[in-house]
Amino acid sequence: MPVLVTGGAGYVASHFVLALSDRGERVVVLDDLSTGFRTAVPADVPLYIGDIADAALVSEILKGHKLSEVAHFAARTVVPDSVRLPLDYYEANTVKTRALLATAIQNGVERFVFSSTAAVYGEPDIVEVDEDVPPSPINPYGRSKLMSEWMLRDAAAATGLRYAILRYFNVAGADPKMRSGQSTDQATHLIKVACQAALSLRSSITVFGTDLPTPDGTGVRDYIQVTDLAEAHVCALSHLRDTGTDLLLNCGYGHGHSVLEVIEAVKRVSGTDFEVKLGARRPGDPAALIARASRIRSTLDWRPRFEDLDEIVWQALAWERLDMARRTAASGTDVVSTHHFHTALQA
């Protein structure tokens, strides 16, 4: 049955769209293209450009395509920006989610998959975080997402709407077929930033904190490959269709890599060296944050395929090269052919 994907032109959501489309499922995308890219949406997928809080538009889409399922990814996600612009984040992530939920329920939507974040946990005093750890977000981004979780759960209890909430850890990599990847200009993801440094798009990279209580003194995170994450959403949706029982799941691998390990992987895979600066630890950064991923593996038929860090880095590098070539072509400063794109992927 067809699925409405909000924010479907963005990083994670575009991979979910690809995963559904590859299975022959019908998908409809709603995105305001404020951070997403039209090119990330397959040509045969209907794309509506607009706001998720536009009740008339959302109702028109739901009715016109006879949709009873929504996968909600549209959000603002840059943590430092949320600290600087908290009200913008509460509006985009909380107020507009409330509006979308109301419209969905009014139009008979039966299943709702919500893209949440491990930022709802804040700074837990344990390394491996399971879903029973009490949320305690430390920034407006995490709080805005947690509020949306609460609204979804309360609305479901009152209406019978079935839901799946997926809390991501650190997302990385790209579609192995290079149909989509991380293209956001202001992205702060470590692997993307390190890949940009390897390709001389940045002059250096800074490590924030080298005296943490971890094996090499730098922060440890659980990196989940984006296609594996998209598959987790597909499995969650299938679960809702089959059993109807609600879900709250961490999305991670259950093991982590330090900042220095990631940087060394990027240098190794790219075959290049780049300057690494050492900086002070940032307030609010936990030393280690790893998902306890047993619930998702036992609850869903989810088997990740891309856990290898070097493979994730290779994908990110290949996408960055391709994206760089496309941007160069679009700027008119060079003529980039299909051959050049292929060369970029193989380099």
Image (cartoon, rainbow, N blue to C red):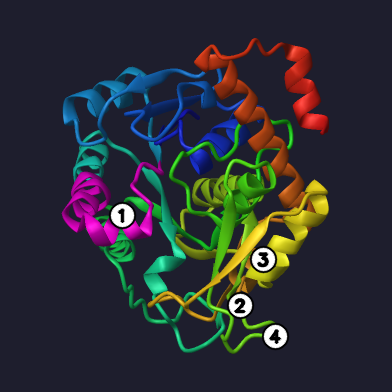
Whether residue 309 is visible to the viewer of this picture, yes or no, is no
Closer to the chain start, of discs 3 and 1, is 1
Per the rendered image, the range of residues in magenta is 72-98
* Alpha carbons under labels 4 and 2: distance apart: 8 Å
Label 3 sits on residue: 253
Mark in the foreground, 3 or 1: 1
Mark sitting earlier along the chain (4/1): 1
At 46% from the left edge and 27% from the top edge, which residue is drawn? Answer: 37
Q: Position of residue 61 (x, y in %)?
A: 31, 23
Tell me the SS state at disc 1.
Answer: helix
Q: Is residue 89 magenta?
A: yes
Q: Which mark is residue 215?
A: 4
Residue 243 is labelled as none
Local crowd size for mark 1, using a 10 Å CA cut-off: few (<14), some (14–19), many (≥20): some
| Spot occupied by residue 262 in the image (x, y as percentages of width and height) | 69, 63
Q: Real-space Cα distance between discs 3 and 2? A: 19 Å
From this view, report whether residue 174 is shown above or below residue 310: above
The residue type indicated by label 2 comes to Thr
The image quarter in which residue 277 lies: bottom right
Answer with mark 1 or mark 2, whichever residue precedes in sequence. 1
The residues bearing labels 3 and 1 have C-alpha atoms spaced at a distance of 27 Å
Residue at 42% in and 74% down: 282
Q: CA distance from mark 4 to mark 1?
A: 31 Å
